Amino acid sequence: MRAVAPEAPSWPDFQALPPAAEQSSASNIGETVIAAQDLGVTFAAHGHETVALTGVSLAICKGEFVSLIGPSGCGKTTLLRLIADLTQATSGSLTVNGMTPAEARRKRAYGYVFQAPALYPWRNVERNVMLPLEVIGLAREERQRRATRVLELVGLTDFRRRFPWQLSGGMQQRASIARALSFEPPLLLMDEPFGALDEITRDGLTLHLHQLWRRTGLTAIFVTHSVPEAVFLSTRVVVMSSRPGRVVAVIDCDLPRERDLDVRESPRFLSVAHDVRAALRAGHADV
Amino acid sequence: MPRVVPLLCVLAVVIAVWFAASVPMNWSQAQALADDNASWTDIAAATQSLDRPLLPTPAQVAGNMVTTLVGYPITSPRSLLHHALVTTWESLFGFVISLAAGIVLAIGIVHVRTLDRALMPWLVASQAIPVLAIAPMVVVVLGNIGLTGVLPKALIAGWLSFFPIATGMVKGLRSSDVMQRDLLHTYNATTAQVFAKLRWPASMSFLFPAMKVAAPLALVGAIVAELPTGAQAGLGARLLTGSYYGLTLQIWSALLMAALLATLAIGLVDAAQAVLVRCRGGRL
C-alpha cells in the first residue's frame, strides 16, 4: 500500500514566529473563565441511573493550563463535554466566560480536540484546518491566511496537501490541534488527545503543546490518564475519582512557567507527581 | 493491459461453448431442410447459417448487429442504433428521476424523524410489487391519462432503480461518526452546514455503489416498459417483434445490445467515481 509519511524530524522554532496574544492575556490572568458550582450529571439508561459526576466545584482562570486526571469512568471527559455543551448537566451550575455553555458554544468560545483526530478523510490537511473557518463564514483569503499560520504553528506546512490517511497518528493529532486553533478561540479543550500515540511521539507533542500554550496565552483544559503529562503541562492538576465521578484534589504545579522535558527529572516535578499519585490512590481507596 | 487477459479468456470460452451448442440445438431444423442424401457434415454446416435458428451462432449475431447498427439510417425502424438510442434516452431519464427521488427521499428520512417512520416501510413495500409484471399495465394506464412517449417508460425505469439509491443514501448520510458530528456542533454549525460539510461528502462512498446497482435496473425498467406500447421503438420493441415473428437473430442482437449498454452505464459511473477519487487524493 502507500507509504505513511514519517514524523517530521523536529518541531518548529516558535521563538522565530511573530508573537501572538501572550502579552495581553498575561495581564489578564485572574479573570475567571470556567466557574462550576456543585455540578452533577446522572445518565439514565435501561431503567437504572448512573451518576457520572457529582458535586464538582471548580474555577479556572484565564491563561491557566488545567489537567483533569483520574481513572476511567471518573467523569473527566464528561466534565469537559459539559463545558463544551456536548453533554447537559443534571444539577448545579456552570458558566463559561460568564455565559452558559450553550451561549459560549454559539459564540465559538472554545476549540475542542477529541480523543481521535476526527479529520474528514475527503479533505486534505489544509482543508481540514479550514473547516471551522468555512463554518464561521470567513473569506477565502482570510481562511488561507489563518490555515497557513496554524499549520506553521504545529509544523505541518510541508504536509498541508496530504490527506489524513497519508499521515502518521501524531501528525493527524497535530492537524486536529491546528484545526482547533484555526479560529483563534481563547479556550482550548482537549480530551486525551495523545492517548492513542506511542510514548516518543507523545513526548514530542507534549513539549510542543506546552510551547504552543506559552506562546498563545490560551486557557487550556486537558484530560489525561498520564501523571507526568499532566504535571509537565499544567499550572494545576485536578485529580478525580470514579463511582461516582468527583474531584478529590486540586494540586498546584508550581514549576517554572517555561519548561522543557528535563524538568521531569527535577525534585520539584517528582514531588508534585508524587502528590498527584497519592491523591489518585486516596480517591481510589474511598470506593 | 494484463487485466483484459482473464476477461478475454472468459469471452473465448463463452463463444466456444456457444458455437458448440448451436450445432445440436439447430440440428433437427437443419436436418428437416436438408436433402435426404445430405451427409452429417453438410447438416452440421447448415446449423450455422439458418435464417431463424433456435440458437443463432455468435458469428450470425455479430453479423446481424453490424448490419443493423451501420446498415440503415439512424431514423429507420430497422436500425438497431435507433432502438438502442431510444432505450438509452428512456433509461437515462429514468435514472435521473431515480437519482433525484432517491436522494430527496433519503435527505427527508435522515432529517425528519416522522418521515423515517412513515416512509421507510413504504419504500420497502414498493419493492415487493412486481413492477416487471405490472409495468405494461402501468404504461397503458398512464397512456390513458395522456402520459405517452418517453415519460411513462422513464417512470418505470425510475421506479425500478430508485430503491438502491434511496437506501444507499440513507445509510450514507448517516455514515459519519459521532465525533465528526460533535466537531461541527462545537463550531455551532447549522443543519445545512452539517449536511454540506459532513453528511453529503460522507455519503459519496455509498452513492456510487448504489448507482452501479441502479443503472442497469433503469435499463431493464425501460426495456420492460417498451413491451406493451404497440412495440414502436426501443430494445423492448425489438425483443417483442422478434419473438412475435420468430426472428431469433433480432432478439439476440437486442439482448446483446442491452448488455453492452448496461456495461457502458456502469463504466460511466466508474469514470465519475474515478474523478471524485482523484479529487480526494486517492480514496473515496
Image (cartoon, coloured by chain):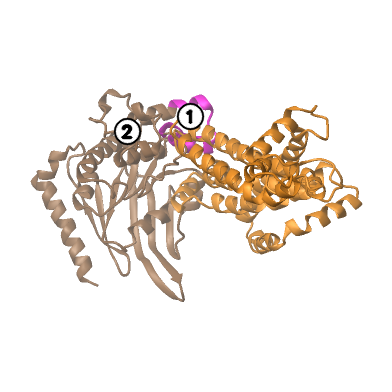
Chain colours: A brown, B orange
Give the Cα distance between marks 2 and 1: 17 Å
Image location of residue A125, percent across then percent down = 41, 34
Which residue extends farthest front?
Answer: B37
Q: Residue at x 62, y 37 (%)?
A: B264
Helix, strand or loop status at disc 2: loop
Residue A152 found in image quarter: top left
Q: Would residue B247 be visible to someone looking at this image?
A: yes
Earlier-in-chain disc, 2 versus 1:
1
Q: Do pointers 2 and 1 mark residues of a single chain? A: yes
**Magenta highlight on residue A134:** yes
Q: Nearer the viewer, residue B7 or B172?
A: B7
Q: Is residue A98 left or right of residue B223?
A: left
Percent x, y of residue A29: 32, 41
Which residue corresponds to the image point at 39% horizontal and 29% vertical from the top-left? A160
The numbered disc on residue A143 is: 1
Q: Quadrant of the N terminus of chain B?
A: top left
Residue A183 in view in this figure: no
Q: Nearer the viewer, residue A213 or A123?
A: A123
What chain is tagged by disc 2? Answer: A
Q: Which residues are magenta?
A: A125-145
Residue B202 spot, x, y in % from top left: 52, 45
State the SS at label 1.
helix
Q: Picture coordinates of residue A49 (x, y %)?
A: 42, 73
Residue located beneath label 2 in the image: A154
Q: How many marks?
A: 2
* Residue A143 vertical position relative to residue B255 in the rendered view, above or below: above
Tell me the amino acid under the disc marked 2.
Val
